[in-house]
Image: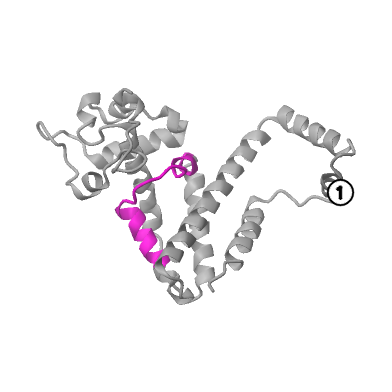
Amino acid sequence: MSREGGSSATGAAGATGVDPEELWLAPARPRRGRRPAFSREAITAAAVALADAEGLDGVTMRRVAERVGAGVMSLYSYAPDKETLLELMVDHVSGELAAEDISPTGDWRADLKAVARLQRAQMLRHPWLPAALSTRRTPGPNTLAVLERVLAALRPTGLDGAAKLEVFAQLTGFVAGHVGHELAQAAAARSPERAAAEVRYLAAVAADGHHPELAEVLSAPGRPLDPEATFTRFLNRLVDGLDTN
């Protein structure tokens, strides 16, 4: 695969083929040539802006290079492929969470819910993020800063280390999945024809006699469409139901 399309390598560096030691521990400077008039931070910020505006498909090394006023080949010293660039992008936006006050209060359930709400707001600002998180990512410094605070918030639970990491992964996965659904619902609402077709389809299924449980559910009064309230209900069910025994 060409550099423009990303790398498909796998192995010791992880599912994305990115070497975390080289990415996060090596100095953020080009490996060869003279010092350019841009930085890894500028490249990453340009890629995030593109993704925010056009989705991940709009992010190519060539278009990022155009945004920072550089030749595309010079970018490869900072990000040799799109997978590496995506790692940088995820950690870049994680800096928004790292800057938030996530200080433990002693009420770990309340703390987890607060983190989840911050995550949801972050993912709504960056609609490409849920999809980016669906594959394995190596945690960069901003991501690790958020993780450190969540682990501190979970200290009162008495859970072992592995279980704490599982809780954080479960929470983040829930938020990413929920936001992905929210975004899909919002897109569908912008197409009245599609929404009307879905209503007609479900009405036909409910009337076919083969789905009595679904028919009963659909005949009940619906809840008002309130994304905030819906997220809160789902979040409460998840966090309040966590077993720390």
Q: Which residues are magenta?
A: 128-151
Q: Within 10 Å of the Cα at label 1, are there few (<14), some (14-19), or many (20+) other Cα atoms?
A: few
- Name above or below for residue 39 compared with residue 24: above
Identify the element where label 1 is drawn: helix
Residue 83 image offset from top left, x and y in percent = 34, 36
Horizontal side, residue 176 vs residue 132: left or right = right
When the figure is inspected, residue 45 is found, relative to residue 191, above or below; the finding is below
Considering every residue shown, the one lying at the far front of the view is 11
Q: Residue at x 49, y 54 (%)?
A: 172
Q: Residue 49, position in %: x, y?
A: 39, 36
Q: Position of residue 226 (x, y in %)?
A: 68, 51
- Residue 137 magenta-drawn? yes
The answer to whether residue 162 is above or below residue 121 is below
In which quadrant is the N terminus drawn?
top left
* Mark 1, residue position: 216
Q: Main secondary structure of the magenta part?
A: helix
Where the C terminus falls, by quadrant? bottom right
